[in-house]
Image (cartoon, helix red, strand yellow):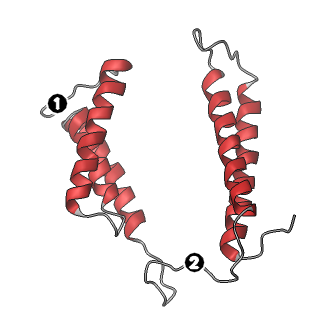
Amino acid sequence: MNAPTSSATRKDYYGGGLMIIVGLAAAYAGLSYHVGTPAHMGPGFFPVAIGVLMAITGAIIALGARNQPDTGKEPAGHGHGDGMPDVRGGICIILGVLAFLLFGVYGGLVPATFAIVFISALGDRTNTVVQSVLLALAMCMVAIVVFWWGLQLQMPLFQWGM
């Protein structure tokens, strides 16, 4: 097989390889703890499971990069031909995390989840405000079912102040 030659393909190939290495390292480190079974999980179960899943995902990414046809061209960007980085996404993610912290303390699980998803979704230039609201509402429902009901997270759904 030929090695990937385009820049985008090389990035996928090396990124997948890095995910494999990090995933296997996490799984190996988790084995030093008691792993247990899915019914009776030990402290090493989660790192091993996540590490294995990360390694599998990395392998899929790397193998997918090997199967991409090489056109010799870079993929089209988001209209930033002048070489300036697009910082909107990074800023929105940082602001979303800060909003989650603020609303988590003063508002509860639902407002905190809505804030982080809505603000972070606005970092993608292809999302509209309506799409961001719908995604945030859907993730609020998932957070209620998974964290509050399923895992019984000791965080109120709504609260006013501390």
- Image coordinates of residue 137 in percent, x first then y, are 23, 43
Q: Residue 75 has which mark?
A: 2
Q: How many neighbours does mark 2 have within 10 angstroms: few (below 14), some (14-19), or many (20 or more)?
A: few
In the picture, which quadrant includes the N terminus? bottom right
Of residues 90 and 40, the one drawn nearer to the viewer in this rendering? 40
Q: Say which quarter of the image contains residue 114.
A: top left
Q: How many neighbours does mark 1 have within 10 angstroms: few (below 14), some (14-19), or many (20 or more)?
A: some
In the picture, which quadrant includes the C terminus? top left
- Image coordinates of residue 158 in percent, x first then y, are 17, 30
Amino acid on which disc 2 is placed: Pro
Q: Residue 158 has which mark?
A: 1
- Image coordinates of residue 150 in percent, x first then y, are 36, 19
**From the viewer's perspective, is residue 116 above or below residue 128?**
above
Label 1, secondary structure: give it.
loop
Determine whether, in the image, residue 107 is placed left or right of residue 79.
left
Residue most extreme to the top: 40
Q: Residue at x 70, y 42 (%)?
A: 55
- The first of marks 2 and 1 along the sequence is 2
